[in-house]
Image (tube, helix red, strand yellow):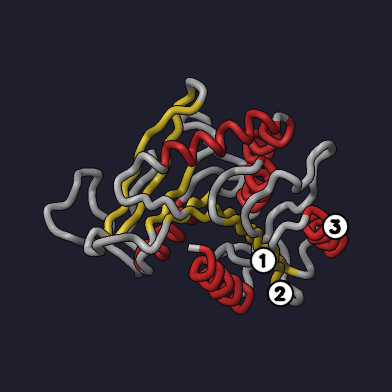
Amino acid sequence: MLRNIISSIVLLAAVAQPATAELIGQSFDYEVGGTTFEGYVARNTDLSATKGTVLIVHDWDGLTDYEVRRADMLAALGYTAVAVDVYGKENRPTNMDENRARSGELYADRELFRARLSGSLAAALELEGVADGVILIGYCFGGAAALEAARSGMEINGFVSFHGGLGTPDGQDYSATIAPVMLLHGTADPVSGPADLAQAVGEMLEAGIEHDAQLFGGARHSFTVWGSNDYDLAADQGSWSALLAFLDDQL
């Protein structure tokens, strides 16, 4: 089970509704296609209205404390943040081989991938404190998921990919995309390099999709992931500022 954590941003409450207004974070279960998933929602109950909703899709290692902390950070800024799960509550990876297998299963079955993304959105919209205005973001594998959701025509307000996989699968394009897309990417990313970035931007331009890309010179893959070999403080802070500006524009 996803454990609540104490961060420098916010003291997380228990699953029960708090008696007084505060910043809270709690796990929640939901079902998509007969499979149970476990997500996490964080919000500020002291606000009369949220500034908007941010859905966070996890990296290839599943929903971890990393996504929880990002959700807490957004809740502290007045958003309702929902970290969703696309693997399943009983299907979380525990090592690199399982990371590769779980993400590979969804890359190989794009219909299932899209069903889990849309089902997670539907579940999030049922939560207390969630607003109609929604932005979907993701990191690494989650960044690729954000672009998959965009290409699927998901009806939300925008999509943001942090150092995500930028390749477009055969048979897909951005013709169904209805909301702006933001790419936050390192120029030294060995997973999706400059050529992939140029192709993705070209496809969005051809489809007439509102888009933007902010590049971070010399940043490698996972530049926002604290403790990783690729972590880059300037790129992390710059991409976070870019996200907040995007949220201000679109929500």
Specify which label sits upstream in the sequence, 2 or 3: 3
Specify which label sits upstream in the sequence, 2 or 1: 1
> What secondary structure is marked by label 1?
strand
* Residue 53 percent across, percent down from the top left: 43, 55
Estimate the spatial distance between the alpha carbons at disc 2 and disc 3, rounded to whole Å. Answer: 18 Å
For the residue pair 207 and 165, the one nearer the viewer reads as 207
* Residue 10 percent across, percent down from the top left: 31, 65
Q: Quadrant of residue 5?
A: bottom left
Which callout, 2 or 1, points to the residue nearer the camera? 1
Residue 186 sits above or below residue 140 on the image: below
> What secondary structure is marked by label 3?
helix
Estimate the spatial distance between the alpha carbons at disc 2 and disc 1, rounded to whole Å. Answer: 8 Å
Q: Which residue is most to the left?
A: 19
Q: Quadrant of residue 12?
A: bottom left
Instruction: Specify few, some or many for label 2: CA neighbours under 10 Å numbering under 14, 14-19, or 20 or more.
Output: many
The residue sitting at 49% across, 56% down in the picture is 66
Report the residue marked by disc 2. Answer: 216
Estimate the spatial distance between the alpha carbons at disc 1 and disc 3, rounded to whole Å. Answer: 15 Å
For the residue pair 54 and 155, the one nearer the viewer reads as 155
Residue 191, visible in the rendered structure = no
Would residue 23 be found to the left or right of residue 224 on screen? left
Report the residue marked by disc 1. Answer: 184
Report the residue marked by disc 3. Answer: 199
